Structure formats: structure tokens, C-alpha cells
Amino acid sequence: MRDYDSAGIRNIAVVGHGGSGKTSLVDALCFAAGSGKRHGTVKEGTALTDHIPEEIERGYSISLGCAFAEWQDSKINFVDTPGSLDFQGDAVAGLAAADGALCVIGAASGVEVGTERMFRAATAKQDPVLFVVSMMDKEHADFDRIYQQIKTRLTSKVIPVEIPCGVGAHFKGVINLFTQRAYMYTSGAKGEYVEADIPAECQEQFTRYRQELIEAISATDDALLERYLEGQEIERDDAIHGMKDAMARLDLYPLFCVSSENMIGVRALLTELVQLMPNAYEMEEIHALTGAEGHETVQLHAKDDGPFAALVFKTLAEPHVGDVTYFRVLSGKVTNGQEVFNATRDGVEKLGHLSVPLGKERVEVNTLHAGDIGCVAKLRNTHTNDTLSTREHPVRLPAIEFPEPVVHFAVKASTRGEEDKLQQGLHRLHDEDPTFSVHYNPETHETIVGGMGERHLDVAMAVLKRKFGVSADLSKPHIAFRETITAKAEGQGRHKKQSGGRGQFGDCWIRMGPMPRGEGYLFEDKIVGGVIPSKYIPAVDRGVQEASARGVLAGFPLVDFRVEVFDGSTHSVDSNEMSFKMAGILAFKSVASKCRPVLLEPLDLLEITVPDAYLGDVMGDLSGRRGSILGTDGNGDRTVIRAVVPQSELHLYATQLFSLTHGYGTLTRRFSGYEQVPHDAAQKIIAEHARELEEAEA
């Protein structure tokens, strides 16, 4: 493979809904260009960028995959992203590594929720987007219908550049509106075609779409518009240049069509990607960063003579290889074996066996230039979102903003004795996928894992078993309920034990009262006259705290209360710290039950974005979950709902939201605080907890 500088490199994220044909298209593009050695298929598990066992077994992309094609003196890096919303994190990472998006839409399935989501994400990043209708050879394929769907549901600025010649089983070629020629495909293995005049049966369609294209391009450029209005012909090169400029401004989105399986339109698409998509050098203005030293902001340019800086956008653990680190070079160049500085973690790494990724293979190179995508194995301490630079010019690039997990489960090792192995494996999974979270809940004594959906966590457990050799079971996590008191009371705790020899004696009187929510615990010494020696007061405090950890109603910790020890008595021989600790425990048990204890439950603040058509269903569902609606805000054709909902009502809520909104609803959630549980709900929780204790003791 030859060297390419930033002007010859294009980085393209291939995005869209699951099952739209992204992976098959990348495989076909690379095969046509010669970098792919065979024409693989997803069905047979031979597609270039779907190579991990879980992807092959399930038949869909789980992790992003990288490949490249060399075409017309350019290198096109493809980042194939998962289409399922459960693996949205890798799709976000893929967009972060790219300078443009190739949005794939199935010719039969049309625009779907994943299409909308990824198109919005790409345009929010100000990336040019090129649409392609895939699987034009399939039954029920309809190019015109897909074009109208894109116009009504995504953007009115879409315009066809290539149109199909035939449809379904009769799809035999494409007509390029720039060249005004038809490309009729032969039975060649790599998509060879014969250039021909436009067939008579396609002439009317061609004339209509050609007129639309020229009008759309002219409307974005004053000089072209003037020539068009004067009746002058817009030459091919001028039209392509105008289209590229309009794409960079997000004024136009070209539309193409292909059949990846039959290799129809694939070679033409490669040519258009080179002509229309920006090269890495042209995207220099979007890269800015904050230096690792101080708070100085500097601009990065995709030039070889600049200081080296690269962003790690993916880490993948491979058996027998170790961690493989994927990174995008934003400035400078790097050579094989060079030492670089990880400014994020303040460490030095050596880039041995520097490579460019091609599916599961890695092609070793001597140099990676500015703008290119590379990978390297066995770095010591480098993870996703880290910045690689030099010690002379340490910089930190803005981190990729990954979505927060929305589904949570408790996890434990299936086999006793593998707890440490499980913890190591879970944290390695998080290194691979930042949207997979893991933490320990000290109140419920559970390890909690989080992800983007049930399928996400199911796949994570399969990867855990294959890569790290440990099986794990998922279950509904316990809720960290708490208790508190709502009234004041006082009482005595007296511990006396005599069993021959030196006995035990501790006696204290305490007052308990509530404190504001979130204030915690306060212990005050109000003893007068030394009726309890000062050295025993801390023991009373420890006793109260120990007893409060077991609560009053259902064994949950008691919080937000104050205690005063104001009286008591002692014995000159039998009193000691342990006796007064027991007295504190007994005093708590005596007094807390008289302070009208209540149950507290944790609440989460939800921000849910839904299309207006589903607003009523979502609001009704939230009410059924004891949710309190704080307000709503309009956002175009969508509404943002802010609500506080008990955590006990939110298990698998993301799945329900997906069902209610057909995948269009999104949510974020964060801890809000604790509030009192209504009486009826509290009684159910107390009874359920009692049953669990009985079952555990049985």
C-alpha cells in the first residue's frame, strides 16, 4: 500500500438502521477496490468488517469495524458502525473518527428510526452526508419512494445524483446525472460495467431528475444560478464542484443507489466518494483542543509538519493479541516504533507494529500521515478517549461524548470463587465499550452493570465468557431503600449482664428527632454532671449508628435524624465501652419505633424526548409508574418531558419506552434524591422484603 497524505485521505462513517446493508456495502466497496480479497456476505459470516464471533453468530454488527479502499489516487477509510440502538456507542465513536457520513437506507425497508437518529447525529457534528439506497435488486425495492421518504422525514435538501436503471430483479445498472451516461453492469466479479447511452425507458425519469439536480446545485451558488437562468449549460466539473461545496455547508445531500450483492453501482459510488466527500486536509478547521499544560486552546491542522496528535476512538481486546487500539491522527505523522506521550494518563507508549485496519486483519505500515486512521496492539495504559501526542507538545483532544447507560442489572459470577475474575473482565469490557458501565452498590451489596439495552448486556455477557473465561448471571437489581423518622421521642437503653465475675452495665437516655432530607446523621452529647463518663459517650454513638444501619421497618438504613444523649448511669466496676455500645443499640430500638418511621425510596430525574405523536402514551405510562411530571418543552416536532420517577418503577423502562415510541423515544436519567414512599406502596415493599429474608434464611 502506498503512502497518502491528508489531501489523499477520506474518512467516512457508514451509518444507518440495523439491517439496511451497511456492512455488505463496505465489503463490496473494498472488494471492488481490491483491498478486500473476497466478496463476503453477512449471512455466511464472511463480511469484511463483521468478524467477531458474536457478530457472526447473530448476523448483525455489534462493534465498529474499519477497512480501507484505494481508489483514484485516494485512500478511503470506512468506519462501519452498528445500526442497532443497543450498540449506539460505537456508532458515536465512528462518527467522531470520520469527516463525513455515508447513510445507508434499505430499498425495501426505507427510512427507519436508526436512519433518523444517525442522520441527526452526523448533521449535528456538521459532517456532510451522502445517502445511498442499498439492496436495489431485492423484491419491493422502490427508489422513488425512498427518495420521497428522505425528503419528508429527514431533509428536503436531498437530491439524486444517480438513479436506477431497472428495479428488483431487473436492476441492471445506474444512470449518473452528472455524466448523463448509463453504466450497465456485466457479470464481472468486481462490478465491471459498460458505459452506454441512456435507455429509452429511463429517459423520462432521467430528464426529470437531471433538471432537479441542476436546479438544486444552481440554487446554492450565485454564479451557477446566473448561468442557469441565462440558459447556459452547467458543465459536469462545475456541477460536481458546486455539489461538493453545498455538501460542506449542509445545503445539499446527494442520493445514490447500489446492489452490494450483485456489485451494481459500487464502482461508481467509489468514484463519487472521492469526488464529493472532503479529504482530511479540507476538514482542518474543525479540530481544536486544550493543551495538557494550562488552559491554552490551540488549533490542529491535518499537516505532516505539525505536532503529532491522535484521538483513540476504540479499544478492542483480542485473545492471544491483547488490546488493539484504534486512533485517528489529527495532526503530524507517526512512524513505526516511535514513542508517543499519552497526555490523558501522563505516560509513554511505544507504537510497535504500526498498522492500518482492514476488518480483522492489520496491514503494517512504516508511517501514518495526518488525517489517517491506524491501530496498534499491546499498549500498556491507553484507552478509548485518550489523546496520543508528544512530550514536547502534549495536548488533550475533546473527548467523545458517549451516551449514558439506560438499562441496569445486578451481576454475579455463575461459579463460586470467580468473583475477582468477573470484576477484571467487567472492567475490561468497559475499556472496550464506554457505554457499558460497572459499579458496586455498597447499600445493596451488588455489582451493577449498565448498558444501552437488554441485547447490549446479553452480548456483553457472551463476550465476557468468550474473552475472559467467566460466566455471569444477570438479575433485577435491588433498590437501595432507606428509612427515616418523622417525629421526636426519647427513651432509655439499659444493658445489664451478670454471669459470674465481672459483669456488664451500660445505661443511657436518648432523644431522637428528624433532620432535613439529605442532612444525614448528627449525634450530640448533652450529658450534665458526668452521669455517663465522657470516655463512654463515643460508644453510645457507635451503638446508635450500628443499630440505625439495620433500620426499623424493613431492615433498610435509617437516615436524616439527630440523637442527643442526655442522661444515664454507670457502674464503677461493670461499665465499659462495649456495655455502653449495647445500651446505645437498645436505646435506638426503643426510641426509633416511637418516632413514626417511614420508608424512603430513591428517585431518578428523567429527560425523555419523544415525537409529539407518542406524547400521550408516554405521559400516561409515567403516571402509572408513580412519576411526577415537572414540565415539558417543545423542540420542533418533538417534546422533552422532565419527570421524577421512583427507581423501583424504572427497571427496563428504556425497553418499554422503545416499544411505546417504536424506537423514536430517547431518555437520560440521573439520581434525583430520596422521598417518602406512599403508605400502600410502602406496605408492599416491607412485606416483600420480609419474604425475601424468610427465603434467604430457609
Image: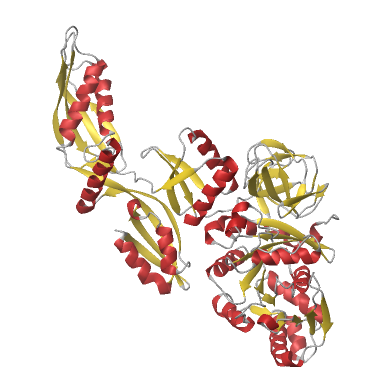
Nearest to the observer: residue 279 or residue 222: 279
x, y percent for residue 249: 67, 71
Q: Up-down: is 458 above or below 196?
A: above
Q: Up-down: is 621 above or below 360?
A: below
Nearest to the observer: residue 170 or residue 26: 170
Q: Residue furthest top?
A: 501
Q: Up-down: is 503 above or below 10?
A: above
At a point 57% along the width and 69% down the height, the residue shown is 115
Nearest to the observer: residue 315 or residue 609: 315
Nearest to the observer: residue 222 or residue 108: 108
At a point 70% along the width and 64% down the height, the residue shown is 26
x, y percent for residue 462: 54, 49
Q: Quadrant of the C terminus?
A: top left
x, y percent for residue 533: 21, 15
Q: Work out whether residue 544 can be spotted.
A: yes
Numbered marks: total: 0
Q: Residue furthest front?
A: 44
The quadrant in which residue 141 appears is bottom right
The quadrant in which residue 185 appears is bottom right
In the picture, measured across the screen, residue 252 lies left or right of residue 625, that is right
x, y percent for residue 220: 69, 79
Q: Quadrant of the N terminus?
A: bottom right
Q: Work out whether residue 404 can be spotted.
A: no
* Image color mode: secondary structure
In the picture, measured across the screen, residue 402 lies left or right of residue 594, that is right
In the picture, measured across the screen, residue 690 lies left or right of residue 656, that is left
